[in-house]
Image: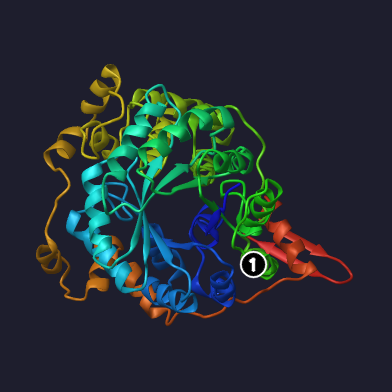
Amino acid sequence: MAHVEFLDETMRDGQQSLWGLRMRAGMALPVAPLLDKTGFSTIDLTGGGMLDVLTRYCQENYWEGLDLLVEAMPETPLRAGLRANANVTFSVSPRALMDLWVRRLCAHGIRSFWIYDVLFGMDNMLRLAKVAKEADAKVAGAIMFALSPVHTNDYFADKVRQLAASPDIDSILLYDTAGVLEKERLEGLLPKLVAQANGKPIEFHANNLLGLSGKAYCDAVDLGVSVLHTASKPMANGPSVPSTEITARNMELKGHTHSLDKSLFQPVADHFRAVGQSAGFLIDQYAEYDAFSEQHQIPGGMMGTFKAQLAQHNMTDRLSDVLDEVAAVRRDLGYPGMATPFSQLVGIQAVLNIVTGKRYGTVPDEVVQYAAGFYGETVAPVDPEVMDRIMSSPRAREVLDNPPADPDLDELKKQYGTEDLDELIYRATVPQADIDKMRAAGPVRRDYPLLSSPELEQARKLMEIARSPVVEVKTAGMDISLRR
């Protein structure tokens, strides 16, 4: 039997998967001290996407909100996620900006990082790990799992060997964005990863898109995983990770031990459920098994984006065609793992192929950059015919003639006109107009109004299903008028 550590994903992957990164600080602050006392080994708290979304769509100061949450959780190491070659953008960021991002997160109290690159650009991953070590932060090197003919067990084991050889990597994180890992594959994969991990702990993160990840967690612990990523029940499952509640119970039933205070589970869950209901966000999700997901491997959060894009073109009935095309584009492009940015690149290209009716007739700049190797060496070669179409697209020559710039820190300060390092990150990643709107909105709120009643719930349901420009409902206890 094993002792299992739990890493909390409620405020990062949970809200990213279910709330679209729109968790404001005040939505979590009331129960942040409870999460801090629950006994998690680490609490995953933030990432670059949150800076962008909170500023542009919530008009909330990212740094101020981060400071409030860090202050509320002094006992547990807080983690940030890093894509090794970019922050916010789907393209590539200057190395100096990425180094600065790590240093500023450390300055604001982050003491743990998970670092990934879907193409496993080890130079960038290990450079950022070394920067994190300047502040004595812990670093998990991520193995982004994907299904394809080239993503073999030996392929992943070699990546673990390279990561584990670095003194700046403290643990290995097996990250299954599509939730496709089952016992048979785990039995072949995990012993190889453990053998190459140089004694370093193996973490496991699996989004529960197919309803398989809870069982995968049980199997993974038997095969050497010692840290599981979970979220409070209303923020779990579906495109998020399995719930802390059921995973802790499963571990106990299998004879394993953990360090969690289960008495704190319910008040945390009650709070996030109430906030989610008030804000109109997804909560208490589940997923049915869909074997086709193993082919397209689309992260759950992208389904809503696909539907919105197709709705703009009055083509919502073509969703199944888009999913077929995603699988085809992924094969064409050499089987990139379906995590940021490649899940978005593959998905956007698939939508364009369907909407325009011509495969690769319109090619985004980022797909040209990918095919040209700007992101790193592809896992498998791009299909030669598709490569020809990409490189003959109207924008290809200009993109190739203008590779991403790589200014140093002094050049970045001059470019963005500031010596303030937090402000520099803002200006380098978010449009100035959005920064101005955020500042005009005032200080970060420390709470969130919990507006909930039977009448409000009925109004919310009407808003979800109503398609007419005007809807009026009158009952003895309620009078509602909805207008588009």
Corner quadrant of residue 476? bottom right
Q: Secondary structure at mark 1?
A: loop
Q: Is residue 157 visible?
A: yes
Badge 1, how many Cα within 10 Å: few under 14, some, many 20+? few
Q: Against 151, is 376 above or below?
A: below
Q: Nearest the camera: 306 or 144?
A: 144
Q: How is the image coloured?
A: rainbow
Q: Nearest the camera: 284 or 415?
A: 284
* Rendered residue at 61%/49% (across/down): 242
- Which residue reaches farthest front? 1
Q: Which residue is mark 1?
A: 261
Q: Is residue 121 left or right of residue 20?
A: left
* Rendered residue at 66%/74% (across/down): 450
- Which residue reaches farthest right? 476
- Which residue reaches farthest top? 385
- Residue 260 at x, y = what percent? 61, 63
Query: In the image, what residue type sits under mark 1?
Result: Asp
